[in-house]
Image: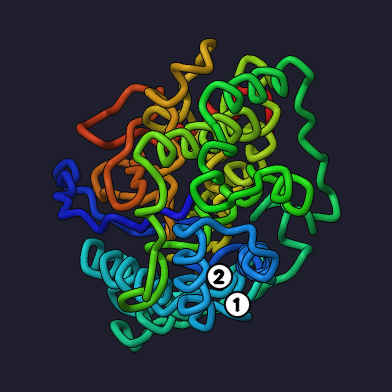
Amino acid sequence: EYYMYPFDEVRITPAPKGYKPVYISHIGRHGARYALGDGVYEAVRKVLSDAHAAGKLTEAGEDLFVRYERFYPSVANRGGDLTKEGQKQLRLIASTMHREFPEVFKGKTRADVLSTAVPRVMLSMMSFLDELKGLDGDLTYSVDAGRTYLPVLEPDGGQNPFRVKTLIPADAKASSVAMHAALIDSKAFCSRYFNDIDYLESTSGTWKFESDLRTVGLQCLDGEPSDDFSDIFTFDELFGIWEVRNYNGYLYMGRSPLTDNSGCTKNAAILENMIEEADSDLASGGIQLRLRFSHDTAILPLVSYMRLDNFGAVVDDPKEVRNYWRSDKVPMAANLQLIFYRSKRTPEILVKVLYNGHEASLPIPQVAPSFYSWTAFKDYYRNQNNF
């Protein structure tokens, strides 16, 4: 979930003859950020500082303590904040949208824009809009944010007044615990840096320290970070941490048989809203862009619900989840775009689905390479009985 947006070179498949893009419906994750909260940075610092004072660090641990003290000022009091790299990501995505679909921005273009009321998300929205406005002087837009929109922006968000919490059954939790036990050896990791594991276990916890430390050194930070701490982990340790976190994400947000898809089906509300607003906007012609800015906890279950690419995979064996469902495919600034096309020759509306700038596949027939019938799109998802 800390992976950076790839910005690959992508060739968009041309539309069938006579069709031109006229409308875009978008939902995206905020851009690159610092660790989710100050608590992570502070916890690591306190553990190392206290252990240093108590003489509980090995030689390698003392070196880690010095490195972390040098690193800490660059992240202090920045937990949860959008980085400059995050702002840059949103600007690049906006400029790509404008470049790839100039017909949507021809003449006067009106956008309706929503954001969750979280500073990093609102700053992402502002970066995106500022870039678009600079490219299209005729663009006008209305903006809003707040908890009232969470049912269609982040259904499982903690501030959603209508949230129904996802419950994980006991057997699903047991499978997660078993995977953690098989892949994670926090005592072995921490013993390289602490000379008294019982001390660490009683004051902080070996897994919490290892997990927190993996979180602080991010590729999301601005410029050249003074340290990313990746060298203190072995490859197997890094992969194990990712696999455990990835599997937990699958349980909470994927089409897991152990959770009856409950995490991802909630996000049908986002898609229902996108469908309803697209129909209304296409009929009226008054709005050409719907832009929504949210979190990975909205994007990940949404693409799982849509069965987009491999996100619809139903995997029984926990060890196989990593081969089908990957959380790194929802990077910082991840986004889903529905691009709508019209032709003067036929009333049938076509839709192209872009995920992180790439043409994505859906479990419905294509009417042309990378194009779907809008009618078939609506019928398929409305028949899933989650709207």
Earlier sequence position, callout 1 versus callout 2: 2
Distance between mark 1 and mark 2 Cα atoms: 5 Å
SS for dot 1: strand
- Please determine whether, in this image, residue 117 is positioned above or below residue 187: below
Q: Quadrant of residue 17?
A: top left
Indicate the position of residue 130 as horizontal and vertical percent values: 41, 84
Instruction: Please tell me whether residue 254 is drawn above or below residue 296 in the rendered image.
Output: above
Label 2 residue SS: strand
Q: Amino acid at mark 2?
A: Val
Up the image or down, 161 lies above or below 309; here it is: below
Q: Quadrant of residue 44?
A: bottom right
Mark on residue 228? none
Task: Check disc 1 and give the amino acid type.
Answer: Val
Any part of residue 39 in sight: no
Q: Which residue is mark 1?
A: 143
Instruction: Estimate how packed mark 2 is, as few (under 14), some (14 to 19) or many (20 or more) residues with alpha carbons within 10 Å.
Output: some
* Residue with the most extreme top position: 316
Task: State whether residue 238 appears in this view.
Answer: yes
Give the left or right position of residue 361, taking residue 238 as reference. Answer: left
Q: Which residue corresponds to the image point at 39% horizontal and 70% vertical from the top-left? A: 90
Q: Is 139 or 133 nearer to us in this picture?
A: 133
Query: Badge 2 is on which residue?
Result: 113
- For image coordinates 24% across by 44% down, the residue present is 345
Marks 1 and 2 close (CB-CB < 8 Å) = yes
Q: Position of residue 276 (x, y in %)?
A: 60, 47
Which quarter of the rendering shows the C terminus? top right
Q: Is residue 259 left or right of residue 233?
A: right
Q: Looking at the image, which residue is at 60% across and 33% down?
A: 248
The residue nearer to you, when weighing 87 against 137, is: 87
